[in-house]
Structures are given as C-alpha cells and as structure tokens.
C-alpha cells in the first residue's frame, strides 16, 4: 500500500514536470498564433529576438500567410544592418511612403533586387520557394555550388534559380518536401521564410547585424486632457505585448497653461520658442529593447508640443521605426510629424495619423494592423 502511494505521488510529479517546459515555451513564443510545438517555433523566435522579423499586428506572427517580396527584401535589409541608402529605385509599385521603400532602394543598389523589367518590383507578389533561395543566394554573393541536388522535380526549377537551390540545399538552408520534391514554384509562408533565414544566418556563423531590440514595441504619448491617451490605450489594446509610457512633464500643465486664447500662456510661449524643451519627469527604462516606437501627442498650433522634442532628443532612435500619431480639435497631422524627423534622423519614420480624441477602437486597430513591423 505504502509503495503504491509513493508510486502514485511520483507519477503525479512526473506529469507536472513534463508539462512545465511546454508551458514555459508557449509563453516564450510571444505570438498568439505560434504554438510552442510548431515546427517553426525556434525560427520565429530566433528571427524575432534578432530583430529580423516581428509580428503582423494584434500579437500574431501569421506563420501560414504567404510571404511577399516586400517582406523578404525588408528582412534582408535588416539582416544587412539597415545601412544608409543614398540612391533611389524607381519601381512603379513601391510608393515613397511604403515601409519597404528604403529596403527596396537598398536591394536595387546592391543588385539584390532587379524587378520584373516592366518597372514593377512586385511588392505584394508572393515569394516562391525558388525565389526565397535565390534572394538568399544573391545576398550571399552568388557562390558557386559544389554539386547539383537531385530533386525529383528539378525540371521545374527556373534556370535563374538552379545555382541558388543547389547552394541552399548544400548548406542545409532548404530541405525538400515529401517525395524528394523541392516545389520550386510553391509559395513560401512566413514560417518557411523565418526558417530559411535562421538557417542561413546561423550557417554563416554570424550574429545578425541589426543591433536589435527584442522586437518589442513602445507606445509613448503626451496628453494633457486624455484625448491622446485614449488613442494610446486603443493602440495598446491592438498590441497587447507593447509597453505604454506616458511622457509626463516635470511641471504639469494647468488649464491656464493650456489657454490658447492667451498669447502669453505657457503652451503658446513654448510653441513660439524654437529652443523650448520642457523637462520630462522620469524616463523610459531601457529604450534599447524597442524596435518600434509609437509617439503620440496633441496638436498645438499645427505642431507637436515642444516636450516631444525633449523626448526625441533624450534617446538614441537609430534603427528603430517611429510611428507618430496625434489628436486635435480638427487640424490634420500636417507637417507636425515630418518636422520631428530631424530630431531622430537615424530612425525609420512612418507616416503619422491624426485621430479625434473619441476615435473608436476599431479605427485605431485597423490603422495599427495596416503596418507590417
Ligand atoms: C495650446 C493648444 C493649441 C492647440 N492647437 C490646436 C490646433 O492648432 N488645431 C487643432 O485642431 N486643435 C488644437 N488644439 C486642441 C488639441 O489638439 C486637442 O484638444 C487634443 O485632442 C488634445 O489632446 P490631449 O487631450 O491628449 O491633450 C490645441 C490645444 C492647445 C492646448
């Protein structure tokens, strides 16, 4: 009887212990749609932790979505360390404000991307498995592969991709599918992209080049009458994994300070003084952990309040993506965001968006989800 009880206790302990690592891994993936047992979990977390890929919004990674060419070139650009780009490409389907514009310019300047010859880059076109291999092969400097790989469907591999596919298999970057097929024209998923990327970077024996944050997002905002705060909270609901930070003035603004009808009010004086830098109380703890920073503010006389300049000058935003947002009585965001660019010139600035203080969660969520970061 005694032995039976001990054996029962041991069995229960065993079950509990074997369940623990799985639970820890689930919370580690950080994405609602990436389970700890998925074959790609290591690749997804590797790409996230090294700043190569992040989520698709709403705490998802969308592992089964088809990767598109814009995503792929963006990832390779990040892996190369997001170098400064001076030349511009002229693809008709790469808008100047697209998140992937700089990456495509870089890709075109290095010979990594050449487009389709019709002036199109094919930004939204799916990436085929042979294209994925080709992009990595070109990024590697077009090495000559040692030997031909005998895939059963080798006859389907396009001429331009043959060397790339041979090289990628030789290096263990790609593997075949069932029946020793490579499926060259099959669309690559985001999970497959993450896996090939991880194997490629690890095979090079390199640490990924971006001085990465940890793929984390910060929502920083300044708000005196809660309108901008409402929007910041909506963004937080759309991105539950993001951190929220209120930019708090050392000296709070009273309603007299905010009286825009008084030309001598504190807010008006500051807005008229290019050198004004109202002090901030406290600071963001470890800005380096963030790759994406939303910055929210109320419009004051068409511009961001000067405390936003203080904030931008307080940290190193190099390599981070900044996404501005604002609230106002009626004014558009206008030049308020672009006038901030010179205060964090090494950041990747996205177009900003103005909301009314009472904007619905769904509106804000739709805007957040329109970003790929
Ligand atoms: C000094 C000052 C100047 C303002 N200037 C403008 C303006 O130029 N255009 C506008 O539409 N609203 C203007 N507003 C209104 C605010 O932009 C609006 O109420 C905003 O949503 C406030 O955000 P908050 O509650 O987060 O502080 C101004 C408000 C203040 C206090």
Image: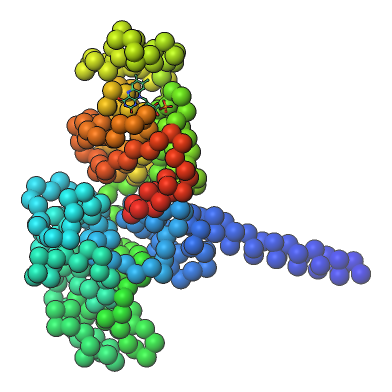
Is residue 199 visible in the rendered image? The answer is no
Question: Residue 12 versus residue 252: which sits nearer the camera?
Answer: 252
* Point 37% across, 29% down: residue: 329
Left or right for 238, reference 341 = right
Q: Nearer the viewer, residue 221 or 215?
A: 221
Question: Residue drawn at (33%, 28%), measured in percent from left and top?
Answer: 299
Across and down, in percent, residue 210 comes to: 27, 49
Q: State left or right for residue 231 relative to residue 12.
A: left
Residue 270 drawn above or below residue 346 = above
Depth check: give the residue in front, 34 or 89. 89
Q: Quadrant of residue 3?
A: bottom right
| Residue 12 as seen in the image, left or right of residue 211 | right
- The image quadrant where one finds the N terminus is bottom right
Say whether residue 202 is visible.
yes
Image location (x, y in percent) of residue 202: 31, 63
Residue 46 x/y as whole percent: 39, 58
Does residue 81 lie above or below 218 as drawn?
below
Please tell me in which quadrant of the rendered image residue 295 appears. top left
Q: Position of residue 207 (x, y in %)?
A: 29, 54
What residue is rendered at 21% in x and 91% in y? 155
- Asked if residue 100 is positioned above or below residue 288 in the image, the reply reads below
Q: Is residue 200 above or below residue 287?
A: below
Q: Residue at position x 40%, y 36% from top?
A: 356
Which residue is most to the right? 1
- Quadrant for ligand 1? top left
Q: How many marks?
A: 0
């Amino acid at each position: 009887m005694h032995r039976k009880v001990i054996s029962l206790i041991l069995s229960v302990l065993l079950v509990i212990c074997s369940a623990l690592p799985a639970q820890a891994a689930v919370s580690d993936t950080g994405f609602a749609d990436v389970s700890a047992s998925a074959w790609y979990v290591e690749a997804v977390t590797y790409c996230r932790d090294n700043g190569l890929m992040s989520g698709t919004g709403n705490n998802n990674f969308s592992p089964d979505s088809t990767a598109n060419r814009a995503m792929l070139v963006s990832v390779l650009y990040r892996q190369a360390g997001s170098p400064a780009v001076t030349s511009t490409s002229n693809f008709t389907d790469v808008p100047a404000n697209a998140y992937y514009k700089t990456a495509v310019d870089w890709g075109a300047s290095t010979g990594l991307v050449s487009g389709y010859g019709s002036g199109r880059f094919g930004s939204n076109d799916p990436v085929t498995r042979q294209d994925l291999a080709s992009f990595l092969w070109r990024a590697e400097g077009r090495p000559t592969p040692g030997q031909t790989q005998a895939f059963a469907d080798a006859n389907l591999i396009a001429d331009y991709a043959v060397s790339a596919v041979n090289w990628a298999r030789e290096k263990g970057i790609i593997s075949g599918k069932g029946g020793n097929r490579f499926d060259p024209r099959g669309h690559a998923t985001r999970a497959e992209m993450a896996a090939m990327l991880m194997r490629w970077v690890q095979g090079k024996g390199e640490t990924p080049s971006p001085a990465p944050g940890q793929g984390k997002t910060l929502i920083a905002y300044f708000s005196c009458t809660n309108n901008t705060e409402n929007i910041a909270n909506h963004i937080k609901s759309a991105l539950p994994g993001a951190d929220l930070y209120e930019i708090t003035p050392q000296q709070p603004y009273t309603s007299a300070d905010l009286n825009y009808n008084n030309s001598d009010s504190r807010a008006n004086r500051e807005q008229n003084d290019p050198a004004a830098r109202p002090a901030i109380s406290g600071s963001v703890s470890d800005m380096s952990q963030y790759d994406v920073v939303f910055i929210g503010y109320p419009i004051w006389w068409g511009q961001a309040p000067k405390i936003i300049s203080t904030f931008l000058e307080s940290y190193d935003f190099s390599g981070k993506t900044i996404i501005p947002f604002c609230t106002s009585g009626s004014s558009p965001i206008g030049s308020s965001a672009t006038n901030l660019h010179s205060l964090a010139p090494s950041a990747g600035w996205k177009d900003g968006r103005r909301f009314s203080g009472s904007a619905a969660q769904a509106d804000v969520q739709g805007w957040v989800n329109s970003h790929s970061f």
